[in-house]
Image (cartoon, rainbow, N blue to C red):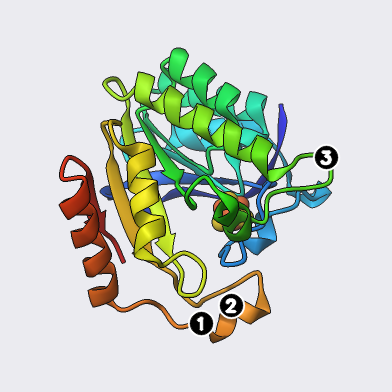
Amino acid sequence: MQAFIGDFVSAGNVDFSQELFMKIQFSGCDYKCPYCNTPEFLETKLEQQLDLREIYKEMQNHIGRIEGVFLTGGEPCFQKQALKNVLSKAKEFRLKTILDTNGSKPEVIEQILKEELLNTIIMDFKAPMNELFDKVTKSSTFFKPATEIITETKQTLEILKAYDEKTNIIFRTTIVPGLLFRKEDILKMAEEIEGINAIWELQPFRNGLLAKKEMQNINSPTPTFIENLKESIKKNIPSLNVRIIS
Ligand code: SF4
């Protein structure tokens, strides 16, 4: 089967483990977050087409060297069948599977969880489910209003709640000055994931390879700023397991 793959590394370092993982970056994404650091993978391009057998061969060659496969993007759930096939093959090789998703495709996420194809899901938890969500994700279109996207993201949260005993769940939120940084917005998000057995990671916006030029003048939030947000969350909802990553 052919899939749109922006890049893949057979055995590399990842930010969540000391072990080596195969990292596969699917291209295509339904969001256009202004701070996206993979703008080159937001559209699918013909030259990114890859026969998945190449990936399977690399997986097989690296058994014993890699701990698992890490699927990221772009948005991997955009290519449902290719995603399922890669996860199934990784399971066949007894590799750990980790998916990084924006959570916009609840039906895909539910199916792969149901089929027990995932060990860990990292959901980019972008913003509270109100008017700010579209400002942060730039996801609404003429055909799909922001309300529909929010409804789907809420469905994903419900699904994650249903599977939180069987799967490791990590929410990851980027704190972006001028966009997503207010305490009240972060506390609203905290309420939205309260009750889900998960780790919530807060990370600072980093000014690197960016999709939007206007973001290049924005500085990263300070460690103290993020620590204060974390403390506010802990004070309001002590049950949430929050950590800061850089
Ligand atoms: S969800 Fe946002 S940050 Fe992630 S790949 Fe898509 S546009 Fe980039």
Q: Nearer the viewer, residue 180 or 199?
A: 180
The earlier-in-sequence mark between 2 and 3 is 3
Image marks 1 and 2: residues in contact by CB distance under 8 Å = yes
Q: Nearer the viewer, residue 236 or 90?
A: 236
Q: Is residue 14 in view?
A: no
Residue at which label 3 appears: 143
Give how far across and how far down residue 4 sits, in percent: 71, 42
Give how far across and how far down residue 238 sits, in percent: 15, 45
Res 76 → quadrant: top right
Under circle 1, the secondary element is loop
Amino acid found under the numbered disc labelled 2: Met
Amino acid found under the numbered disc labelled 1: Ile
Amino acid found under the numbered disc labelled 3: Phe
Q: From what the image shows, is residue 10 above or below residue 215?
A: above
Q: Residue drawn 28% across and 31% down?
A: 195
Q: Nearer the viewer, residue 173 or 19?
A: 173
Q: Alpha-carbon distance for marks 3 and 1?
A: 31 Å
Q: From what the image shows, is residue 192 above or below residue 244?
A: above
Q: Spot the residue most to the top.
A: 115
Give the number of the disc on residue 218. Answer: 1
Q: Is residue 3 in view?
A: yes
Give how far across and how far down residue 177 sits, in percent: 45, 74
Res 227 → quadrant: bottom left
Residue at which label 2 appears: 215
Under circle 3, the secondary element is loop
Label 2: few (<14), some (14–19) or many (≥20) C-alpha neighbours in 10 Å? some
Give how far across and how far down residue 21 sits, in percent: 38, 44
Q: Between tags 3 and 1, which lies in front?
A: 3
Q: Nearer the viewer, residue 239 or 43?
A: 239
Q: Residue drawn 75% across and 52% down?
A: 43
